[in-house]
Image (cartoon, coloured by chain):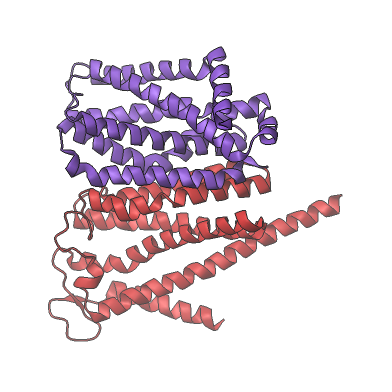
Chain colours: A red, B purple
Amino acid sequence: MIWKLFLFLLLAFVSIAGIAFPIVKKPSAWYEFPLIPGLEENAKIIFFHVPTAWLTVIAFLMSTIYSVKYLRKKNLDDDAKSYSAAQLGIIFCILATVTGSVWSKFAWGSFWSWDPRQTSIFALLLIYGAWFALRSAIEQEEKRATLSAVYAIIAFITVPFFIFIMPRIMSGLHPGSADDTNAGPVVNFKMNSNMQLIFYLSLTGFTILYFWMWRLGYKSIILTAKSLLREQNKQL
Amino acid sequence: MKSYYLFSKDYHSEIRTRYAINSLIMFIIVAVSVILFSIGNERIPGNLTAGLYWVVIFFSAMSGLGRAFISEEERGTSMTLQLIASPSTVLSGKIIFNMILVFAMNIVITFIYSILFEEFVIHNHILFIINFILGNFGLAVSATIIAAIIAKAGSKGTLYPVLSFPILLPLILTSAKLTLFSIDGTAINDAVFELAIVACYDVIMISASYMLFDFIWKD
């Protein structure tokens, strides 16, 4: 209970601070953000865009870890955990795509420009979509769990290509691209300390939210399976 | 050596029916003629032909390579294979078969392209050949492992391109770029990073395939 209250307060504070705190040229009070040239007021979406993108990758990582666990132990609970992580992952993936393209409309002038990071989030969306399509195609539980675990692992090992290598070879608009003159993410450079504080608070808040939702998700999947089993036993 | 026998089994049954070869050839002709019809009398620049070249390769591969394991499931011979051969032998045989299919297919596509598209002129031949070998190797390996998943998922043919595309995307993006380089005549020294990416992809995919195939193959 205390966790949920804490999480509620944290996310409420982050949302209010992220949206309402003013951006001024020379920040003096604790609640003022610095003006980042080229971003201006757009900079505020970073408190929501980066955590969603971060959770997309975390969810995919956890889905893969539980897939590996499933293949080793053949315990269907691990499959439920992996499935629940992927369910949240696709939600955060869509959120990251939407917030990203809104930001790109105002910062770069168009909703979509096939920047390497945009390409990689698109590939992640495709992977999630293909994974759910594969799961829905198989009836038998064990077979579904095994095949989707194998596919999740194969898909996961292509992710480093998208996240680390593509942005280095393709020219792009995101910080950290091949032709970027700043040679570093916005986070390290131009944010002042209170902006960084809110940014990391938002990251923590969203991560805790994710883990909470993930626990609820896999527990409900396991409970549904158990109640189905009980009903089948009753009918027999 | 055993995997060679498996390959020769596939080869002989393919020669008897010629299903994959015929459908591949027809698919290549259809895909290229669709592109030609949509272009009309326009001259398309070299960078577009490099992309279109990989579009045709991807979809032809998707139409032909998926058969590898589905045919075993359809004929009901996968149980026998499980009894007489280890999973890695089966995978090796299938990869060899698909590899030869991919190489034959891409030689045909390259030939057709260089005849029909005026802008498709390779200036750096060595780079093109290295990319051709590395790219086809990766394509065959990834297509084979996904084909195994599809066959066990109940031969859902429509799922095959859906599952393969995200896996093949890094390979296709990099290979398309390298094809563009070889059309532009870029020196090999400037393309080492891209070649390294394709080589890494091949190594990662082949090791992952051998590690994971046991789980797919054994019910």
- Please, is residue A59 above or below residue B184 in the view? below
- What is the quadrant of residue A18 in the picture? bottom left
Residue nearest the viewer, comparing B216 with A121 = B216
- Quadrant of the image containing the C terminus of chain B: top right
B162 or A47: which is nearer to us?
A: B162
- Measured from the top left, where is residue B34 in percent x and y? 33, 19
Nearest the camera: B179 or A82? B179
The answer to whether B88 appears left or right of A101 in the picture is: right
Toward the viewer: A218 or B85?
B85
Q: Is residue B87 left or right of residue B173?
A: right
Question: Whole-percent x and y of residue A28?
Answer: 17, 86
Image vertical order of residue A62 relative to residue B180, above or below:
below
Return the x and y of residue B99 as percentages of the image width and height.
44, 29
Could you tell me if residue B158 is visible in this image? no
- Single out the residue that lies furthest toward the bottom: A29
Q: In percent of the image, x 53 and y 20: which residue is there?
A: B11
Residue at 49 percent of width and 27 percent of height: B97
Provide residue B129's location: percent of width, then percent of height: 28, 30
- Which quadrant: the N terminus of chain B? top right
